[in-house]
Image (cartoon, rainbow, N blue to C red):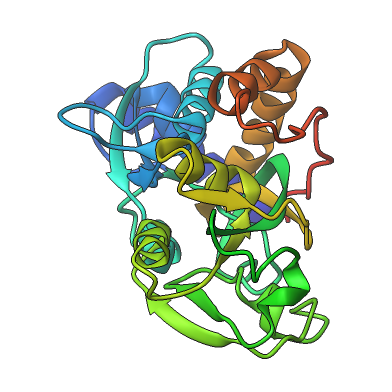
Amino acid sequence: MRRAYVALAGAIVMGLAACGGGGSYTTVVGKIRNTGHVVVGTKWDQPSLGLVTGPGAPHGFDVDVARYIVGYLGHGRHVDITWRESPSSSREALLQNGSVDLIVASYTITEARRPKVTFGGPYVIVQQDTLVRANDTSIKKVTDLRGKRLCLAEGSNSYRRIVDPPPDGKLDLPAVLVDAANYSDCVRKLSEHELDAVSTENLLLAGFAQQDPGRFRLLNDPITEEKWGVGIKKGDTATCEAVNQAIAAMWHDGTATRLLHKWFGKTGLKLPSYLPKPEGCP
């Protein structure tokens, strides 16, 4: 009885909001379908994923994925997207306080984040690799990072795969951690010899390498596979399920493959080629 009452109450609220042009929505998919508007968080400093270079919207793979998902959730209706920068250090807070409705921003699904975020997807599985200066011959494989200066981007967990033991880490290598505000700051510090390596997902690193050809190189020595998901406010199961349907459609109609080749086809990386198994929407 209580469940039926809650469902009925939610339907009434959504109906009133749709008629009155305002109000709040219990789900993001409900907001999109009733208002034709959504706020999407992406990175604004990651080449080929989410980058702002001037007036207008960000551009990159994650941005295009977000556009596809939003279009699917809108059932073909035009949906206005407000783009909001979502740095790694503030993604959970932005979802929790309602500043964004969805986050598509190289957002790795981890057990530590699950209590705070409902994840749709993953929409792609990528390998963690390492970026170094092209002329640094002292680092040829990931185990050469022992004792090296490694970037710690605020809000990111990638460095743990190298310096921590299992289960959270992988290699348990001693390294000197160098703080950075984000991955663009990591790459700047790498270029200026303030650190020796940046380790995170290879698509993210490849974007920076493409932006400045000849300055950096990927080790091509994968550490782990990471699952990128769509961040949704905790408990919004209906939107999570709709996002999973959108991701499946994106792979089945060839859009995911097309977008991967559009943004990373010239990197030489072996690109993801299949629809990842969804994590579920608890």
| 157 on left or right of 257 | left
Q: Quadrant of residue 116?
A: bottom right
Between 76 and 190, the one nearer to me in the picture: 190
In the depicted view, which residue is nearer to us: 269 or 85? 269
Question: Looking at the image, how many numbered discs can be counted on the residues?
Answer: 0
For the question of whether residue 149 can be seen, the reply is yes
- Residue 25's x, y, as percent? 40, 41
Q: Is residue 95 left or right of residue 135?
A: left
- Rendered residue at 81%/38% (across/down): 276
Residue at the limit of the structure toward the left, as seen here: 55
Identify which residue, 173 or 73, lies in the foreground.
Answer: 173
Viewer-side residue, 14 vs 124 = 124
Image quadrant where residue 176 sits: bottom right
Q: Residue at x 59, y 71 (%)?
A: 157
Image: 270 above or below 108: above
Residue for point 62% across, 32% down: 267
> Residue 13: in sight, yes or no?
no
Q: Quick check: 83 above or below 172? A: above
Q: Position of residue 196 (x, y in %)?
A: 51, 72
Q: Position of residue 88 (x, y in %)?
A: 43, 62
**Position above or below: 139 against 227:** below
Residue 275: x percent and y percent? 80, 30
Q: Is 193 situated left or right of 171 in this image?
A: left
Query: 97 above or below 145?
Result: above
Quadrant occupied by the C terminus? bottom right
Q: Picture quarter containing residue 179?
A: bottom left
